[in-house]
Amino acid sequence: QKEVEQNSGPLSVPEGAIASLNCTYSDRGSQSFFWYRQYSGKSPELIMFIYSNGDKEDGRFTAQLNKASQYVSLLIRDSQPSDSATYLCAAHGSSNTGKLIFGQGTTLQVKP
Amino acid sequence: NAGVMQNPRHLVRRRGQEARLRCSPMKGHSHVYWYRQLPEEGLKFMVYLQKENIIDESGMPKERFSAEFPKEGPSILRIQQVVRGDSAAYFCASSRVMEASEAYEQYFGPGTRLTVT
């Protein structure tokens, strides 16, 4: 079983719609979760992090965490073509070493 | 530029040569992490270092790979006797000192694309 799982997509949404990206993790001890955006050929860019159950909003982005279900999600409101990228979910391991465990990423396509 | 710096951005090595990848953390950060991204694969953790200390090297291949973060200067990931399978993007990330109640936000550098011919 993969430690962090994401649907590889592609997830296609029309411009202006809400994009919903999901992630599950297997390590119940994980406390911190991160969403990175990666454009093709570029490095990952941190866009959100969350470590408490519930929602965390930052501009057009909302991260949601449910530790009981071991589920993390990222909502992107008013999606723009420039949001088209691969979104990586990462969990900080419970071993307290700083290691991030990444999912395979979900490719998002926002169509004008 | 206060971001994470990596050099070189592109590196071509012949099989059997050595590759040295450098990383300078973001200003104010003292923790460095190395990750590898193979073509069409996800990011895999390799090693976590603080100044003069390797904290976690559980993701490092047992042979040919080593990493250091000296008291002065950048962190270096060294790959000896490279093989074609080492061709990948190598990313360095850095974070500030971890506090018990805070998340461990890691910021990535632009990466080094290693090609082994």
Image (cartoon, grey):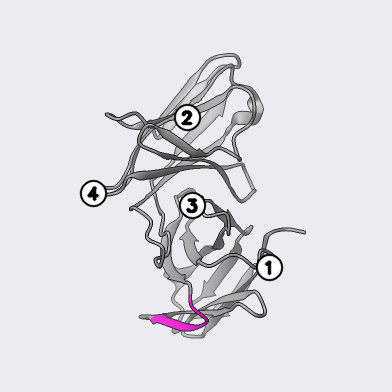
Q: Residue at horizontal 61%, vertical 51%?
A: B42
Of tags 4 and 3, the one toward the viewer is: 3
Q: Please tell me whether mark 2 sits on a helix, a strand or a loop.
A: strand
**Is B107 above or below relative to A11?**
above
Q: Please tell me whether mark 4 sits on a helix, a strand or a loop.
A: loop
C-alpha span from label 1 to label 4: 34 Å
Q: Earlier in the sequence, mark 2 or mark 4?
A: 4
Q: Where is mark 1, residue-wise?
A: A7
The subunit letter for the residue under badge 4 reads B
Q: Please tell me whether mark 3 sits on a helix, a strand or a loop.
A: loop
Q: Amino acid at mark 1?
A: Asn
The subunit letter for the residue under badge 2 reads B
Q: Where is mark 4, residue-wise?
A: B2
Front one among A86 and B75 = B75
Q: Is residue A56 magenta?
A: yes
Q: Amino acid at mark 2?
A: Ala
Dot 3 and dot 1 within a common chain:
yes
Q: Where is mark 2, residue-wise?
A: B67
Q: Which region of the structure is painted magenta?
A: A52-57
Q: Earlier in the sequence, mark 3 or mark 1?
A: 1
C-alpha span from label 3 to label 1: 25 Å
